[in-house]
Image: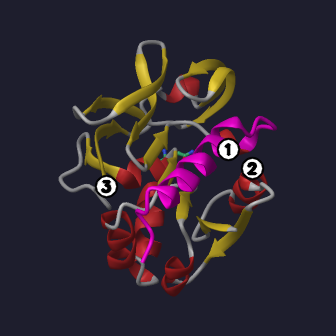
Amino acid sequence: MINIGVLALQGAVREHVRALEAPDVNVVVVKKALQLEEIDGLVFPGGESTTMRRLINLYGFYEPLKQFAREGKPVFGTCAGAILMAKEIAGQPEPHLSVMDMTVERNAFGRQRESFEAYLPMKHVGEDIEAVFIRAPIIQSVGPEVEVLAEYDGQIVAAQEGPFVACSFHPELTEDDRFHQYFVQVVRDSIKVGVTAE
Ligand code: GLN
């Protein structure tokens, strides 16, 4: 069994839990930093990144989350979760957890397009992936080790750097579980290569 956590400070936790389900996966709703020790991979849901950051500090998650990523354990950030992962946030002096070499811009699709859906081809994942964007960020630029997985309108909306995966949209809000199941495979592979082995 592999254990995958969903950070349950804010946002659509239940939907992520459902999308991660697989016969060899135990999904853990993570409410306490100590639970990070039991899991092999972690999802950061969407929500509001500044609020999530406040809760991360309030509940003593900041250093344990940095450590989790430092150990190379897989993290999947969706929407606000991707903002938490970025090394740089356009127009903000400081990033949050700074685990992935990318610059994000918050609310980048503008007010007229608060939310919309698109079907995108995604590298390693499949064709016609249903993507729901809600006050979504874009990934403005990525570092040399980062692979772009999907673009929309010429903007990067999904990317991966080794065990770290981020996207601008909300894959948990559709019935299409392929992106989550891709992340599950990233976690399985990380265990095989011994990243999380003692
Ligand atoms: N706009 C939000 C932020 O900046 C992200 C929106 C979302 O997660 N749906 O945190």
Kind of residue at badge 1: Gln
Name the secondary structure under disc 1.
helix
Please name the residue shown 66% across and 39% down the image: 171
Residue topped by disc 1:
181
- At which x and y percent is residue 77? 49, 50
Question: Is 125 left, or right, of 26 in this rendering?
Answer: left
Question: Is 45 left, or right, of 196 in this rendering?
Answer: right
Kind of residue at badge 3: Val
Distance of label 3 from label 2 (alpha carbons) = 24 Å
Circles 1 and 2, Cβ within 8 Å, touching? The answer is yes
Residue topped by disc 3:
99
- Colouring of the image: secondary structure
Distance of label 1 from label 2 (alpha carbons) = 7 Å
Circles 3 and 1, Cβ within 8 Å, touching? The answer is no
Please tell me whether residue 6 is drawn above or below residue 91 in the rendered image: below
Residue topped by disc 2:
19
Q: Quadrant of residue 112?
A: top right
- At which x and y percent is residue 168? 50, 36
- At which x and y percent is residue 53? 41, 66
Asked if residue 193 is among those painted magenta in the image, a careful observer would answer yes
Circles 3 and 2, Cβ within 8 Å, touching? The answer is no
Please name the residue shown 44% across and 36% down the image: 137
**Mark 1 residue's CB less than 8 Å from ligand 1:** no
Please tell me whether residue 111 is drawn above or below residue 8 in the rendered image: above
Residue farthest to the top, as pictured? 153
